[in-house]
Amino acid sequence: MKKLLFALCLLITAGVTAQDKTNPVIKKGTKFSYTLYTGGNSIPFAAVVDSLGSEYVKIAWNIEGMGTGDGS
């Protein structure tokens, strides 16, 4: 019975910890990195949150070998 109770507590703790990791906070300076796959090629894509407001999000982006932008 003690093993079952311990396993249940461990499972609940793992569930709570996993929920914290799936809800990240996005703020100024948050970086996103992705790999785009197009026509058999892989292209690195990076984005950084420049600023946040109640009605907007300004993002700077860079696609390696293609171009950049600042979201304005």
Image: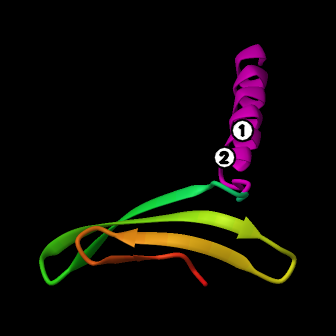
Amino acid type, label 2: Lys
Image point 54% across, 76% down: which residue? Answer: 70
Instruction: Name the residue beneath numbered marker 2.
Output: 21
Q: Quadrant of residue 4?
A: top right
Amino acid type, label 1: Thr
Image location (x, y in percent) of residue 66: 27, 78
Disc 2 from disc 1: Cα separation: 7 Å
Which stretch appears magenta? Answer: 1-25
Image point 76% across, 81% down: which residue? Answer: 56
Front in this rendered view, residue 19 or 9? 19
Q: If the image is split into quadrants, where does the N terminus sit?
A: top right
Q: Residues within 10 Å of mark 2 (few under 14, many from 20)?
A: few
Residue lying farthest top?
A: 2
Residue lying farthest left?
A: 40
Predominant SS along the magenta part: helix
Find residue 66 and name its label: none
Left or right for 62, reference 7: left
SS state under label 2: helix
Image location (x, y in percent) of residue 37: 24, 75
Instruction: Name the residue beneath numbered marker 1.
Output: 17
Q: If the image is split into quadrants, where does the C terminus sit?
A: bottom right
Image point 14% across, 84% down: which residue? Answer: 39
Image location (x, y in percent) of residue 7: 69, 26
